[in-house]
Amino acid sequence: MNNRVARCVMFVTPTNPRFIDKAWTRGGDAYILDIEDSIAPAEKQRCRTLIRESIAKASKGGASIYVRINKPFVDADLPYAVWPGVDRIMLPKTESAAEYRRVHEIILKLEKERGIVPGTIELYPMIESALGAVNIYEFLTATPRKLRSLGGGGGYDMAVNLGIEMFASFDQYAFPQANVSLAAMALDIEPTGSVFVPNPSGRVDQADQAAQQAAALHAAGVHHAGALHPNFIDPLVKGLSPTADEIAWAHKVIAEFDRLTDDGEAVGMLDGKVIDKYENDLAKRTLAWAADCAAKDAFKARSMARARAVNE
């Protein structure tokens, strides 16, 4: 399975059986099992005990599994969060190299104890404060643990930290999100920084909002997005995948650029558009992403078929 493909990553609450039991049928690329904000303090210990069984349930449809822990309770959360089948641990409000390194070391110990190849579970820093956005490069280089993708710098906690209204008509997160994306690119991590799409209502269940978001992200070359409601899954998965026309165009561009190269030329025209090495590189990246999406979708289809057969 290609765990790099995460066109729609949706939060699910382990303490709600309906959410967990149905997650695999929704078609998401990845699910975040949340121990943090969606779980009341009195429920956190019960939630921890549900993580391991929730991994198996939510991944039945081929989705990757992430676990969001609590920054103040890393020692309590991590022994319940690090298991085979987990692809990523998400550390909220990451602000320093020291705290990032400490969590890495705890995960490393648990990986060794539980038969997981050391260093393979990603440690994802959630950037939810100005300090985190400023220090991002420092803690990303603090451990040898690798990340496939990284975004952040927005959301509720960042709004509180900056003292701003989250649902505004302008992009108040432009700087922190751009800084996180630049740090990711400098370290050869795929950036997933958001493109601003107004949502003054603050609603997170409207499929048309998801379609607008997917179109904006897709146009900017961003492949990943988060969701809080199942209505976002299908629009994001479809909207962040290359279209048939884009795939066909990419093949034409590569063929034309190969012809130009054979003729000793560096620049040409195709259907009224300039074709050069930059367009050729973009076309190759389009086809690579299309192949990754196709592989992920095929894996999900096989996984869902097996799960349905067991449930019948």
Image (cartoon, rainbow, N blue to C red):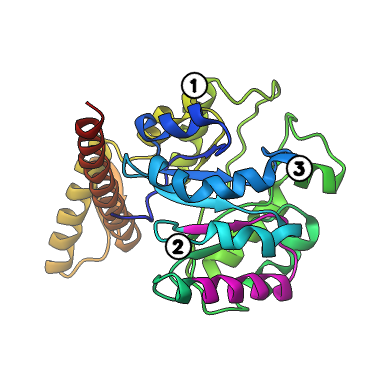
Q: What distance separates the C-alpha of mark 2 from that of mark 1? A: 27 Å
Q: Which residue is mark 1?
A: 207
User: Which contiguous range is marked in magenta?
Assistant: 88-110
Instruction: In the displayed orientation, state which residue is furthest to the right.
Output: 163
Residue at 27 percent across and 60 percent down: it is 267
Task: Kindly identify the amino acid type of the residue bearing the numbered disc 1.
Answer: Ala
Given residues 246 and 151, the one toward you in this image is: 151
Mark 3 vs mark 2: in front: 3
Mark 3: give few (<14), some (14-19) or many (20+) Cα within 10 Å. few
Given residues 55 and 253, the one toward you in this image is: 55
Q: Which residue is mark 2?
A: 148
Q: Quadrant of residue 184?
A: bottom right
Q: What distance separates the C-alpha of mark 3 from that of mark 2? A: 32 Å
Residue 105 part of the magenta-drawn span: yes
Q: What distance separates the C-alpha of mark 1 from that of mark 3? A: 31 Å
Task: Kindly identify the amino acid type of the residue bearing the numbered disc 2.
Answer: Arg
Given residues 110 and 233, the one toward you in this image is: 110
Give the mark, 2 or 1, whose residue is nearer the N terminus.
Answer: 2
Residue at 17 percent across and 54 percent down: it is 256
